[in-house]
Image: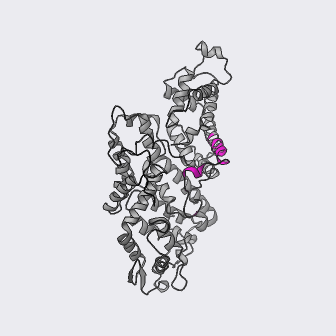
């Protein structure tokens, strides 16, 4: 593993304290909410400005730790025979869980974001199991441990039916061992590729994980069956005994705890801070993680409170995922997007978000493969960039269709109802981007877009305002232009 230090780093994990030259300002507050959540409204950002930065971080982490899961549906543990109309009810339930997941991601701050992060770490694929109760159990588990204890998380996720089906644990028996889950447990979930284990360890671990093959009803709970368990000695990481599932997790964390801590700290650093890793910072994160017995919150609190997290070179250096792109925009504008799922004249916005993010390459409950989306530059290529622009156009158009006037309302609040098109343009652009545009001419071009077809004398004589008849459409065109800016693609 490389030990190079990220060029933008300052003192590795010194606590951030505002100074005259490095103030606590709106950009830093938006940075917090764009990384720890999916953005925040203008009002929320302004309230946070008056808080000490460490107070804000502590509040957001405590909120995530104390926030309840979304309520469990009554059918969460049902098998096929418990439904009166399995095909239709199962389909409706999957729709509801998907909708609930998107709504939670948008509204539950750090807990919502972390739940989606772990969905891309402990990957399953809805198309392999297709059973809505398994989907609901998996979602509940992601929420339960999103900012909890990682060792407990690892232990419980491996026995989740969605995982047992997806990685063939359900097929893993003493007479026909299946190594899929054992391999991914080490390679993807805890240690990293070729990092501290051998093929022999995988083979022996697979034998210890046998036995979870009993199902009394189709798509019901998956239970342990002692008759399919390999009841003989296995040698894992140099220790030999008749190990079982629980023993595997215990041995893994006892023998490889430092490696696990470094691997998870690195992955969280790349997700929350920068794709270019500062391993000095990661080492401190990993130490905190290891010394707290694999509690996730202390490591994140140390990271998010650090000067490193607020380094100018760390801000605006990650390409937005499709969910970042759409959900952050909706949250930062504060626009009303909660369209009733039963209002077919407009459609359910959460289902629409799912449709758009799927088109942009991020279908939840179905990452690209078992290693998940690799993020950052993988989100943009020559063909996808146009889809990103069009997707944002469509979402904004959907909002206008639902309730016209929201763009004007937003612009008035943000600019104190200014009539100055240059000021309106700059203020709106700077609100959505982390760093100013490269040149003044870039702002001038955007202002020209806003002015659209209104005769210039209306601006010169002060006759135009945000109450102008076509102001909503003018703002829509400005937003369309902003969506195409390279700076808008970054967070």
**Whole-percent x, y for residue 84 in the image:** 59, 67
Decide if residue 447 is in sight here.
yes
Question: What span is colored magenta in the figure?
Answer: 369-392
Q: Is residue 423 left or right of residue 295?
A: right
Q: Is residue 382 left or right of residue 78?
A: right
Q: Quadrant of the N terminus?
A: bottom left
Q: Nearer the viewer, residue 223 or 270?
A: 270
Q: What residue is at 60 percent from the left and 47 percent from the top?
A: 348
Q: Nearer the viewer, residue 465 or 375?
A: 375
Answer above or below: position of 219 versus 288: below
Q: Any magenta on residue 382? A: yes
Q: Quadrant of residue 437?
A: top right
Q: Quadrant of residue 196?
A: bottom left
Q: Quadrant of residue 485?
A: top right
Answer above or below: position of 459 versus 62: above
Answer above or below: position of 372 versus 406: below
Answer above or below: position of 29 versus 181: above
Q: Nearer the viewer, residue 485 or 150?
A: 485
Decide if residue 84 is in sight here.
no
**Whole-percent x, y for residue 67 in the image:** 39, 52
Q: What residue is at 62 percent from the left and 27 percent from the top?
A: 445
Here the colouring is: one colour
Q: What residue is at 50 percent from the left and 55 percent from the top?
A: 116
**Whole-percent x, y for residue 477 in the image:** 64, 31
**Whole-percent x, y for residue 166 in the image:** 56, 69
Q: Nearer the viewer, residue 218 or 208?
A: 208
* Residue most extreme to the top: 461
């Amino acid at each position: 593993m490389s030990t190079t230090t990220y060029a933008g780093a300052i003192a590795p994990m010194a606590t951030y304290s505002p100074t005259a030259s490095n103030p606590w300002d709106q950009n830093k507050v938006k940075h917090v909410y764009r990384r720890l959540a999916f953005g925040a409204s203008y009002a929320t950002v302004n309230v946070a400005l008056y808080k000490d930065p460490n107070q804000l971080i502590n509040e957001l982490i405590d909120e995530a730790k104390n926030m309840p899961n979304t309520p469990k549906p009554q059918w969460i543990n049902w098998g096929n025979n418990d439904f009166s109309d399995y095909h239709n009810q199962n389909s409706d339930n999957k729709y509801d869980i998907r909708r609930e997941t998107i709504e939670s991601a948008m509204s539950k701050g750090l807990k919502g974001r972390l739940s989606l992060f772990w969905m891309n770490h402990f990957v399953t694929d809805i198309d392999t199991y297709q059973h809505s109760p398994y989907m609901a159990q998996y979602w509940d588990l992601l929420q339960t441990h999103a900012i909890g204890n990682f060792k407990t998380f690892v232990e419980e996720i491996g026995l989740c039916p969605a995982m047992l089906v997806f990685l063939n644990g359900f097929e893993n028996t003493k007479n026909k061992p299946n190594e899929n889950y054992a391999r991914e447990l080490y390679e993807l979930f805890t240690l990293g590729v070729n990092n501290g284990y051998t093929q022999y360890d995988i083979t022996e671990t697979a034998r210890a994980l046998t036995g979870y093959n009993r199902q009394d009803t189709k798509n019901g709970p998956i239970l342990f069956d002692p008759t399919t368990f390999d009841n003989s000695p296995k040698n894992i990481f140099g220790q030999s005994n008749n190990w079982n599932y629980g023993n595997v997790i215990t041995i893994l964390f006892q023998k490889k705890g430092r490696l696990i801590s470094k691997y998870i700290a690195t992955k969280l650093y790349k997700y929350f801070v920068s794709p270019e890793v500062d391993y000095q910072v990661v080492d401190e994160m990993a130490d905190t993680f290891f010394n707290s017995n694999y509690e996730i919150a202390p490591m994140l609190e140390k990271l998010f409170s650090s000067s490193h997290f607020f380094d100018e070179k760390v801000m605006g250096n990650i390409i937005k995922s499709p969910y970042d792109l759409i959900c952050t925009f909706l949250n930062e504008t504060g626009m009303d997007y909660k369209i009733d799922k039963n209002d077919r004249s407009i459609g359910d916005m959460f289902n629409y978000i799912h449709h758009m993010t799927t088109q942009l390459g991020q279908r939840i409950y179905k990452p690209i493969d078992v290693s998940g989306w690799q993020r950052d530059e993988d989100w943009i290529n020559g063909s996808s960039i146009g889809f990103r622009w069009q997707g944002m156009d469509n979402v904004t158009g959907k909002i206008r269709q639902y309730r016209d006037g929201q763009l004007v309302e937003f612009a008035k609040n943000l600019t104190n109802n200014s009539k100055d098109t240059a000021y309106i343009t700059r203020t709106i652009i700077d609100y959505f981007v982390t760093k100013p545009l490269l040149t003044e001419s870039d702002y001038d071009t955007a202002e020209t877009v806003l002015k659209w077809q209104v005769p210039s004398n209306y601006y010169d004589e002060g006759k135009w305002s945000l109450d102008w008849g076509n102001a909503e459409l003018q703002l829509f065109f400005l937003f369309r232009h902003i969506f195409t800016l390279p700076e808008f693609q970054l967070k």
